[in-house]
Amino acid sequence: HFASVEMTPGDPILGLTEAYLADARPGKVNLGVGIYYDEQGRIPLLRAVHEVEQRLAQEAKPRGYLPIDGLPAYTQGTQKLVFGAESPLLAAGRVATSQTIGGSGALRVGADVLKKALPKAKIAISNPSWENHRVVFIAAGFEVVEYTYYDPQTHGLDFAGMLADLGKLEPGTVVLLHACCHNPTGVDLNAAQWQQVVEVVKERQLLPFIDMAYQGFDQGIDADATAVRLFAASGIESFVVTSSYAKSFSLYGERAGALTFVAADRDEALRVQSLVKRTIRSIYSSPSTHGGALVAGVLNSPELRAMWEQELGEMRERIHAMRAGMVEKLAAHGAPQFAFIQQQAGMFSYSGLSKAQVDRLRDEYAIYAIGTGRICVAALNRSNLDTVAAAVAAVSKA
Ligand code: PMP
């Protein structure tokens, strides 16, 4: 039956990790990952999460099915994080949120729902974008177009190019936007630029689809939701937000995400939610209990919520410190041209390193990065910072 199945190419990032694990050289560093590591190089288990986990173990609750759209305490908590507790959209009943299998599940369910609701719409994604964005929307049957985003000359945003491209999209096009901590570049818009994007979206009647996988990882929970808050205040009738708790709760494998539709009014929100539920039903029936219970447990306890915010703050401060440290050490090793790393935000930086330089880092220094030059600054720590900076400076010279 399967004789005609050919080998499908593997994920290049996972392939990189395999090569890293097989590398016997001491002091090897993997900057290819998309995970936050602490100063000791471990994936943190947040104390707030651990606390809920212990309480859950004590309670020894049965594991019935969750509703199709998940735990109400989770989806309501998510809405408050995304829009702010006082949001008029929430009061008006215009927001419908579902707990999903990670942010990835939210993207795919969202894409499937949009394909049913708007069969002719295309999707526009940034150039570059997280590789899976293209994969997911193509799998859902979308035609994918790109808008200008990154400027390799400045290692920053080509904002004029972005606005011009958005201004040329066909009305009704879905526009995928990264709320903050753009993956893979680390290049974000400021509030004034977001406001201009809101105006173009309104004028061209585009449908914003905001992927928020790193809320709280750059400036804070509310500041990192600036894009969402501006769209919410804009009078635009409908948009979509996907959330992931993988990074902000350090819950990668629990697959805790959310899909949120904003609709014109309460009735429309209910109808859209019915389509979302039907779509989820056709894929995996209902989400899993554990990750949702952890996030809901933290968000709905004032004490644990404060503890989580503190821990989230520590993660983002460590990222900022690693960015500053990297820039300083690179300059000390004779490579002052990397100052832009401190302007970029979140876990990733488009370092500007070429494929050949990335290959040299691996072959000569046991430092692993992605061929595009994307490095994970959240994998840096005080013990590997100097080695990495020295190696990057060395391969950047010749
Ligand atoms: N969107 C972006 C931009 C991401 O970087 C990621 C995670 N790498 C996701 C969505 C999906 O996150 P999850 O692990 O929750 O599926």
Image: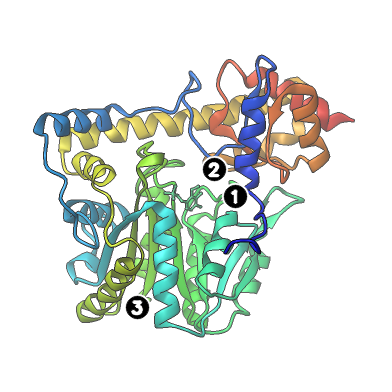
Q: Position of residue 216 (x, y in %)?
A: 39, 43
Q: Is mark 3 within 8 Å of ligand 1?
A: no
CA distance separating discs 1 and 3 = 28 Å
Give the amino acid type for the residue marked by disc 2 in the picture. Answer: Ala
Residue matched to label 1? 187
Quadrant of the rendering where the N terminus is positioned: bottom right
CA distance separating discs 2 and 3 = 30 Å
Give the amino acid type for the residue marked by disc 3 in the picture. Answer: Glu
348 or 65: nearer the viewer: 65
Query: Mark 1–mark 3 contact, CB under 8 Å?
Result: no
Q: Position of residue 169 (x, y in %)?
A: 60, 79
Badge 2: how crowded within 10 Å, few (<14), some, or many (20+)?
many
Query: Mark 2–mark 3 contact, CB under 8 Å?
Result: no
Query: Mark 1–mark 2 contact, CB under 8 Å?
Result: yes
Q: Quadrant of residue 96?
A: bottom left
How is the protein colored in the picture?
rainbow
Residue matched to label 3? 237
Residue matched to label 2? 345
Picture residue at 39% right of the left edge, 48% below the top: 223
Quadrant of the rendering where the C terminus is positioned: top right
Residue 341's mark? none
Q: Position of residue 123 (x, y in %)?
A: 55, 73
CA distance separating discs 1 and 2 = 6 Å
